[in-house]
Amino acid sequence: GWKKRRRRGTAGWWGAAGACASPHPRGGRAMSIYDEVEIEDMDYNAADQSYTYPCPCGDRFVILLEELYDGEDVAPCPSCTLRIRVIFDEASLPELRPPEQGDGAGGAAAAGAGAEDAGGKG
């Protein structure tokens, strides 16, 4: 079953009394799972390091690679109340890149300024 492939280290899900507090940081109530989906069946977006899967409502379930590495395995749909459990093996996940500093526009402007400075000196 899927439990054999779940990542270890999910102790953060449990409160001091051992009862499940809130298994997902985005939801404060007990949750129900719409479906269980193998990560291989999901779409990976390398640019924002996220996995998505089509939701029946027309939107897409989303889970970040960082969340998977943190032991999270529930991907919510941002447009409705449905959630899926992601079946994965941490060893097969792509490498987690550190977050980029600043936004893309600032980096491009800085790179352009550097190129102008280099051209002016040559």
Image (cartoon, grey):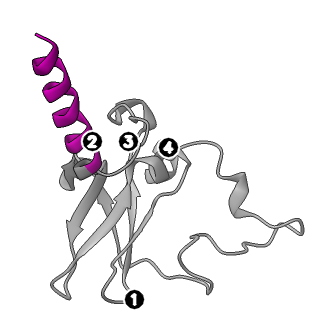
Residue depicted at 22% across the width and 27% down the height: 114
| Residue 100, label in figure | 3
Q: Residues within 10 Å of mark 2 (few under 14, many from 20)?
A: few
Residue type indicated by callout 2: Gly
Residue at the image point whose x is 30% and y is 54% from the top: 50
Magenta stretch: dominant SS? helix
In the picture provided, is 99 more to the left or to the right than 117? Answer: right
Q: Nearer the viewer, residue 31 or 111?
A: 111
In the rendered structure, which disc, 3 or 1, sits on the residue that comes first in sequence?
1
Which labelled disc corresponds to residue 81? 1
Picture mark count: 4
**What range is drawn magenta here?**
106-122
Residue that mark 4 sits on: 69
Element under disc 1: loop
Would you say 112 lies left or right of 67 here? left
Looking at the image, is mark 3 or mark 2 nearer the viewer?
2
**Which label lies toward us, 3 or 1?**
3
Which of 91 and 121 lies nearest the eye of the viewer? Answer: 121
- Disc 2, SS: helix
Q: Return the disc, 1 or 4, that comes first in the chain's sequence.
A: 4
**Image height check: is 65 above or below 59?**
above
Of the two numbered discs 3 and 4 in the rendering, the one whose residue sits closer to the viewer: 3
Foreground label between 2 and 4: 2
Q: CA distance from mark 2 to mark 4?
A: 27 Å
Disc 3 from disc 1: Cα separation: 31 Å
Q: Amino acid at mark 4?
A: Tyr
Q: Looking at numbered disc 3 in the image, what kind of residue is underneath it?
A: Glu
**Mark number for residue 107?**
2
Hey, what amino acid is under mark 1? Thr
- Percent coordinates x, y for residue 39 in the rendering: 29, 50
Residue 105: image x %, image y %? 23, 51
Task: Assess whether mark 2 and mark 3 are in contact (beta carbons under 8 angstroms).
Answer: yes
